[in-house]
Amino acid sequence: MGSGGSMIRRRKLATHIPDKIYVEEITVVELGKFLVKTCGNEGRHPYLDETGKTTLRFLRASIDFIPKAIAEFGANMRNGSFIFAQPGSEFVITAGNGDWEFYFSQSEDADKISCYCLRKPMWRCLWDGVVWAFSQFVPSSLLALTAA
């Protein structure tokens, strides 16, 4: 599952997608409940139509992605949106204002679901810029000090 992307959007993509589900926090439990509501229990999964199987793959990928969103991006799951761009349909699961946006899409390989961080809150973009600038300055300063 990919999680890259060099450009972070400032406008919310999720506002343009009409099919929304609101939760208090995007968690494994909440996504699991939605998975059971949408796709049924494990015993029903082999009998899903192609659209249902695609939804199941997307939801399983999003459940697996939550720890990465928190650890790698520092995302606040009480203020995020998971955007599911399935072939032929889109839907969004949103918590809070949805300032963190993660976009799930299917590649040409139908079994591979990719996820990209599309949007961070403004404060996080500013903080990441400060951290990047500091990381560029400190190593060269330390090198100069140790060489002196």
Image: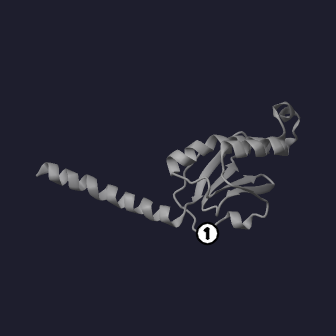
Q: Is 13 in front, or is 20? A: 20
Relative depth, front residue between 64 and 57:
64
Q: Position of residue 111 (x, y in %)?
A: 71, 39
Q: Is residue 90 left or right of residue 114?
A: right
Q: Residue furthest bottom?
A: 11
Q: Is residue 51 left or right of residue 62?
A: right
Residue 30 in the image, given as x and y percentages of width and height: 71, 46
Q: Furthest-front residue in view?
A: 24
Which residue shows up at 81% across the image and 32% down it? 42
Quadrant housing the N terminus: top right
Say which residue label 1 marks: 11
Query: Visible in this render: residue 1?
Result: no
**Residue at the top extreme, as displayed:** 43
Three-letter amino acid code at disc 1? Arg
Taking the image as shown, residue 8 lies to the left or right of residue 132, namely right
On the rendered structure, is 137 left or right of 121?
left
- x%, y% of residue 117? 58, 55
- Observer-nearest of 64 and 116: 64
Report the number of numbered marks. Answer: 1
Which corner quadrant of the image does residue 23 belong to?
A: bottom right
Q: Is residue 91 visible?
A: yes
Q: How is the image coloured?
A: one colour
Mark 1, other Cα within 10 Å: few <14 / some 14–19 / many ≥20: few
Tell me where residue 80 sits by quadrant. Answer: bottom right
Q: Where 17 falls versus 143 (above or below)?
A: below
Q: Position of residue 85 (x, y in %)?
A: 73, 54
Toward which corner of the image does residue 65 lie, by quadrant? top right
Q: Residue placed at 71% from the left, 40% from the top?
A: 60
**Numbered disc 1: secondary structure:** loop
